[in-house]
Amino acid sequence: MDAERINSADVAVVEERRRLLDEWYAWRHQVEEELAEECEIIQRPVDLVAELLKAKTADIGPNAEEQIIE
Amino acid sequence: MRPILLSGHERALTQVKYNRDGDLIFSVSKDQQICVWFAHNGERLGTYHGHVGAIWTIDIDPTSTIMASGSADNTIRLWDIKTGKNLKTWEFPTAVKRVEFNEDGTKLLGVTEKRMGHLGTIVVLDIKVDVEAEQSDEKALTIVCDESKATVAGWSYLSKFIIAGHEDGSVSQYDAKSGDLLYNIAIHELDCPITDLQWSQDRTYFITASKDKSAKLVTAKDLEILKTYVSDTPLNSATITPKKDFVILGGGQAAMDVTRTSARQGKFEARFYHKIFEDEIGRVRGHFGPLNTVAAEPTGKGYCSGGEDGYVRVHQFDKGYFDFMYEVERERQNRLNQQQQSTA
C-alpha cells in the first residue's frame, strides 16, 4: 500500500514537471517567433552581436599585423 | 569544481561581469579599483585607475572595445579596455549605482542615487563604440523616479524598454525612447529592495534578486512573473545560466547580524536552482562573507562570484554539471534527438 502511494506521488511530481517543461518551451517558442518578426519589421539581424563582432573583425582586417600589448 | 581565487581587491566586491566571449572577467569594488582578469587562469591583466570613490557597477560593450563604470564619486566613466585610457567622464549630483549598455552598445543607462534634494534618476547617454570618437556631453534622456528610487535597471530586447527594479520591491517598464512609465508592478515583498536584475541572453526575460530572500523570473514585455525561487537568506544577486536551465543566487546575512562562525568557515554559498522547476539543486560554498554579485559565463562554461570578503571566485563547470538532467528533461532530449534523426 505504502509503495503504491509513494509511486502515485512520484507520478504526480513527474507529470507536473513534464507539464512545466512543455509550458516553458512552448512559451520560449512563441517569444522567439515574435522577436524574429519584430526584427524583420525593423530590418535588424536577430543576432545583432554576431553581426557587430563580424564588423569589428573585418575592420581589423585579415592582413592586419598582430599587436603584442605589454 | 575547483575554483580559482582572484585576490587583488582590498575591499568588498560590488559587481563582477564577463565580456561577451567569456574570456575576461571585470570586477569592481569599494576599493576604487577596476580589475580585469583572464577567466581561464585568473591571471590579472590590469587595473583601471581614475575613480575616487567606491565603484558600484561596471559594464562592457558587446564587442569588448569600451567599458563603463559608475561610482560613489558621482561619475560615470568610459574606458578604452585595451589601453586603460579614461575616454570620458560624466558628472552627476549623486552616486551612480548601476550602468548598462544596450544590445549594440550605442546607449548606456545609469542609475543615480537619491539624496536630500535629489530624486533618484535613470539617465541615458548616447555612446559611440569607438575609442577615437568624441562622446556627447548631453544626456539623451532622464527618467525621474519620484515614487521609489531605482536600485537597478537594464535594457530589454531591441532596446524597446528600460526595466528598473526599485527600493520598494517593484519593477517598472519604461518606453526606452520617450522615458514614459508604462507599467509598475510590485513583484517582491513591499519595501524589500531589489538588489539585482540580470537578463536572459535574448533579453526577453530577466531575473531579479531581493532582500525578501527570493528571486523572480519576469518577462520584459509585460512584467509577468514566470518563476519564483525561494531561499533562506537575503539575496544580493541572481544570474541565469546559458546552455543549462539553471539560475544562480548569491546573498547571505552580513557577519555582524549572525554568529561569526559561518564567516570564519567560508560557509557563504552560491545557490543553484532549476530555472523551470524552481527547485534548489545544489550549493557551492567558499566565501567568507555574503556574496554581493554573481555572473554566469556567457557561453555556459562556468560562473564567478564576488564577495563581501574581497575575493572573486571563478568556477569552471565540470562534466557532472553538464550531465545533470531531470528524468523529464532526458525524455524531452531523447524525443528531440529522435525527431532530428527521422528528419535527417
Image (cartoon, coloured by chain):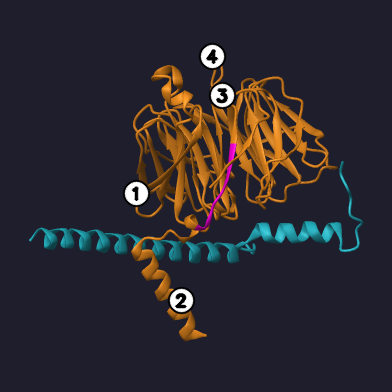
Chain colours: A cyan, B orange
Range of the magenta residues?
B313-319
Q: Can residue B142 be seen in the rendering of this structure? A: no
Which is more foreground, mark 4 or mark 2? 2
Three-letter code, disc 4: Met
Q: Can residue B190 be seen in the rendering of this structure? A: yes
Q: Quadrant of residue B50?
A: top right
Q: Are marks 2 and 3 in contact (CB under 8 Å)?
A: no
Q: Which residue is mark 4?
A: B116
> Residue B141: x and y, percent?
63, 36
Q: Are marks 3 and 1 in contact (CB under 8 Å)?
A: no
Identify the mark at residue B337; answer none if there is no mark.
2
> Residue B220: x and y, percent?
47, 49
Instruction: Find the distance from the CA under tag 3 to the CA under tag 4.
Output: 10 Å
Instruction: Find the distance from the CA under tag 2 to the CA under tag 3.
Output: 51 Å
Q: Count all numbered tags in the image, as a single digit.
A: 4
Is residue B317 rendered magenta in the image? Answer: yes
Q: Secondary structure at mark 2?
A: helix
Q: Which residue is mark 3?
A: B113
Q: Secondary structure at mark 3?
A: loop
Instruction: Find the distance from the CA under tag 4 to the CA under tag 2.
Output: 60 Å
Which is more foreground, mark 3 or mark 1? 1
